[in-house]
Amino acid sequence: MIIMGISSMFHDAAITVVKDNQIVFAAHSERYSKLKNDPFLNKEIVHEALSFGTPDVIVLHEKNWAKKLRQATSGNFRALGELSQKDWIRKFYPALKNIPIKSYWHHETHAAAGVLTSTFDECAVVVLDAIGEYTTSSIWSWKNGKLSKKHSTNFPSSLGLFYSAVTYRCGLKPMEDEYILMGMAAYGNPTDGLRISNVMAEKYFIHQNPFKFPSESVRMQTNLQKGLPSKDFVGESPFDMAYAAQLQTQKRIIAYARYAKQITKSNNLVFMGGVALNCVANTELLNCFNDVHIMPNPGDAGSSLGAAALELYNNTARKVEWKGPYLGSNISGSYPVNKALRSLERNEIFGIANGRAEFGPRALGNRSLLADPRGGDIKDKVNSIKRRQEFRPFAPVILEEHVHEYFEMPNRCISPYMQFTAKCKAPTTYPAIVHKDGTSRVQTVNKEQHPGLYALINNFYQRTGCPMLLNTSLNIKGQPIVNDRLDALTFTQTYGIEVHTSDAED
């Protein structure tokens, strides 16, 4: 059985193909069209997806009729006349024309993407995002092989829309630059940030103290879909606004997650939805649960996998076999360990584009820009290459067996998908990967997870005593991550940065 899961028509369109119980392909539309967060499919991604076989069924990540009904009841009557996902597929992709199409609910596919890629036999599931059809937050229970909804909050209450509204007010692009806002928060003044956060709680949320009313912790009194009211917070520093929004968001995530633990009575958590990309808040969840699983693509693109995995499970009672996020377009050849080591010897900043592209917004070794993290000017150099703001942080990728020596990670925690932050124990030694607040967004790696990347860092460690590298995505601000060999060559020619695609001579 071949199942094609599709998420499209809002932002960051994606396709996943499941064959039997194997995830044989999962990729973002933007990597093919070269349009950042492209909401539409394109012929190139459809063509590559079909190379794994013609699907028996196409499964969509949300109920389009329900979404249109919500839009119409909110006054957007034009939505009723717009093409649906199904219409779009039928009209523009003839190769998919005669394949049956079905759909699941938006938060259901988010939850399924997390649960069905986890190792949990039972867990609580929290989904927080901007908006699905109606639902903006939900709690589920996974027990005895059954996924059941226990709680939900509907539009216009939305923690995701609140964070996006502040993102927009700070001069950034909503539904795209929220991770920049998260980085800005560390530069806010704590006194002013706390003052603004308290005003935000009073103005926008039903309850100022989310821990007192955890079931209603994300309920709002103001619809922020179109942004913050223009009269609010005039003249405030964007960095203080970011601090305030991050503080308010963290509190409400934790309160809602604690409520999920209370009603499901589980010590395991699956966290999904776009809000689950907030790695600063994610770290706090480790203090509430014994184990936390966040699929490395928790936003809408990842729901293409959720839709396909749920269809497989409902028909066969089999979970997909999750081996990791390296599921996209392939660049063949041996991992360029030796070439990368020579670049490091020359103190170069360099790229690696090898193997299958990561499914998710974070580069995890196969489409990465890498450097020695010990140089005092490396952070500024990399930000200059990527055309990014100077305050933007970078992540370390570190040998798993050394992570607790260098970072204040919880004892049980590893972080193969770069989803948690931790204080660096030697910030002056590794300045390139330490943020303003002394933390790093850590990625751990072991031999089984990624043999090539592990071999590279282990060789570097044996030569230098440094068990980590700076790792960031191989792209320029506002552009998608490099996808194929031609993209890698173009990156080198355009920006003068060597991108290694294999250890073989080109």
Image (cartoon, helix red, strand yellow):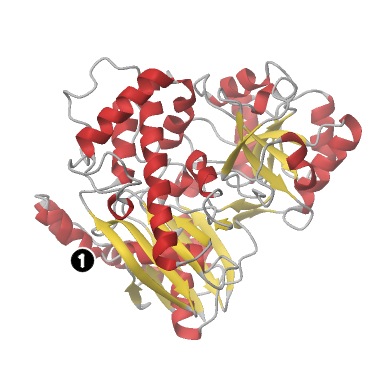
In the rendered structure, the answer to whether residue 77 lies left or right of residue 291 reads left
Q: At 44% from the left edge and 60% from the top edge, which residue is drawn?
A: 261
In the rendered structure, the answer to whether residue 73 lies left or right of residue 330 reads left
| Residue 246 vs residue 255, the one in the foreground | 255
Where in the figure is residue 374, as x and y percent of width and height?
75, 23
| Residue 300 vs residue 24, the one in the foreground | 300
Residue 326: name its quadrant: bottom right
Q: In what quadrant of the picture does the C terminus appear?
A: top right
Q: At 54% from the left edge and 41% from the top edge, which residue is drawn?
A: 481
Where in the figure is residue 29, as x and y percent of width and height?
45, 52
Where in the figure is residue 221, as x and y percent of width and height?
17, 43
| Residue 502 vs residue 442, the one in the foreground | 442
How crowded pointer 1 is (Cα within 10 Å; few <14, some 14-19, many 20+) is rated as few
- In the image, what residue type sits under mark 1? Trp
Q: At 65% from the left edge and 63% from the top edge, which residue is drawn?
A: 323
In the rendered structure, the answer to whether residue 269 lies left or right of residue 229 reads right
Q: Is residue 416 visible?
A: yes
Q: Is residue 180 above or below residue 17?
A: above
Per the image, the residue denoted by label 1 is: 65
| Residue 223 vs residue 311, the one in the foreground | 223
Residue lying at the far front of the rendered structure:
212
Q: How many marks do you count on the picture?
A: 1
Where in the figure is residue 291, as x and y percent of width and height?
58, 58
Residue 382: name its quadrant: top right
Q: Is residue 41 visible?
A: no
Residue lying at the far right of the rendered structure:
463
Residue 25: name its quadrant: bottom right
Q: Is residue 350 above or below residue 397?
A: above
Q: Is residue 23 above or below residue 411?
A: below
Q: At 72% from the left edge and 54% from the top edge, which residue is drawn?
A: 332
Q: Secondary structure at mark 1?
A: helix
